[in-house]
Image: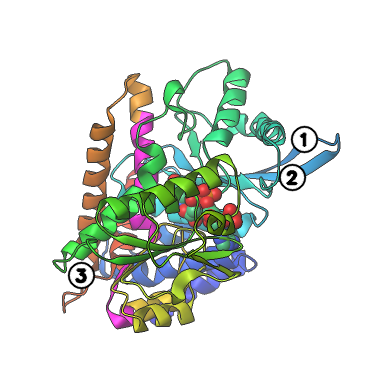
Amino acid sequence: MKNNIKAFLDLVKERNGDEPEFLQAVEEVAETVIPYIVKHDIYYGKNILLRMVEPERVITFRVCWVDDDGEIQVNRGYRIQMNSAIGPYKGGLRFHPTVNMSILKFLAFEQVFKNSLTTLPMGGGKGGSDFDPKGKSDNEIMRFCHAFMGELFRHIGPNTDVPAGDIGVGSREIGFLFGMYKKLRNEFTGVLTGKGMSWGGSLIRPEATGYGNVYFAQKMLETKNDSFDGKAVVISGSGNVAQYAAEKVLQLGGKVLTLSDSSGYIYDEEGIDEEKLAFVMNLKNVKRGRISEYLESYPNATFVKGKTPWGVKCDIALPCATQNELNEDDANTLVKNGCICVSEGANMPSTKEAITVFHKAKILFAPGKASNAGGVATSGLEMTQNSLRFKWTREEVDTKLKDIMSDIHKSCLEFGEDEDGYVDYVRGANIAGFVKVADAMLAQGVV
Ligand code: NDP
């Protein structure tokens, strides 16, 4: 078995050697899925995983725009159309200076499995730009988004590829992108998700990734007859996912101790309650400030510059910022401090070594492709409502989101339960996600 996995990974490395994040994501899937393929004749010998790691299409393009000083700026735009076996490509756009081919291919690859897990008919894709929205005026953001869509519109459509937000792309950016798409195509269609409520958006979409992550963690805790009630929760990030994860934790009776951004984390021993969270939402979403400014209003809290929050003692950890933000040492510290559950809101926030620590300690651990799938699932619900030209209520969407997270949890149990009863959610999510896509690819032949 080890030889099979090694031979496969060697080949993927040979072709994608300078893409470390992509190789990391492929390795995690290969180690759990290849043993399954080998035991199942319908998949064996068909190079099915090799086909899955090769994007169906990669688009890169120039994005030129003029800043407020009249200077011409040049950025690079990307769209990775990874796999369309079970539906149109679907996945977010990330605007961040670190964006490159490796990061977008890892995100697109993860997205294929995640979208399959949601039970909805969505293929996988991802895109974005190395554009940095930080410090830009609203007008600069608008000019960049319009320029970006000036090329992307050729490659997307409601039945082809439906992008959404990700890091650096929230409702403001989706608005500008949608406006330009509509102008160029002269069509009002559900080509992007995360739209505003008055122009095709779905209720609960802004909350969905954070809420969904907490619903998933709740399902994991229930397997141990436990809950969020009274638990100390450490959260990283302070963007869309972190904010709504915190909101749901508070609703379920947990105490939120930390939030962070790329400059450091804040620790509030008294707990970040609803009022303080509303302050953070305003600070981040309206004023576009830094998390350290929390201390100006709540001086009892502390700000730890340049660090992640994993050293703070907690029962539950929710990494909701970015990839590889939680390493082996952090995982050891969390376990030593009595953490019983880690549920990923971000994509691939835990390194491979950190996941090994969680598995060895047999604590509850959910990989992002399962636990953060609520965002794309609700995007799928937005697409359905757009096609129906209809709008479900907040309660209807929230109930559907809860049901989907519960179904994903069940799929993980089906493929991830060990003989001793411990659930390897990584294996469960990878195999459950793989089976549906592989079956569709086999049915469609070698294309
Ligand atoms: P936002 O842009 O709203 O927020 C991102 C947060 O993470 C900010 O607090 C940001 O801090 C912090 N962050 C970003 N990069 C780094 C870094 N290199 N080091 C430390 N902190 C960093 O993004 P989202 O909340 O939407 O996304 C967060 C994560 O969740 C990502 O991994 C994304 O792929 C994943 N995700 C998002 C979904 C969604 O629906 N939005 C769906 C599924 C997954 P700063 O402001 O300083 O940059």
Q: CA distance from mark 2 to mark 3?
A: 46 Å
- Report the span colored magenta: 359-383
**The stretch drawn in magenta includes residue 367:** yes
The residue indicated by pointer 2 is 75
Label 3: which secondary element: loop
Colouring: rainbow
Q: Earlier in the sequence, mark 1 or mark 2?
A: 1
Q: CA distance from mark 1 to mark 2?
A: 8 Å
Residue at (43% x, 51% y) in the render:
276
Depth order, front residue of 276/71: 276
The residue indicated by pointer 1 is 65
Query: Which image quadrant is residue 362 in?
Result: bottom left
User: Which secondary structure class fits the magenta region best?
Assistant: helix
Give amino acid for label 2: Asn
Residue at (59% x, 24% y) in the render:
179
Give amino acid for label 1: Trp
Q: CA distance from mark 1 to mark 3?
A: 52 Å
**Label 2 Cα crowd, 10 Å radius (few <14 / some 14-19 / many 20+):** some
Give amino acid for label 3: Glu
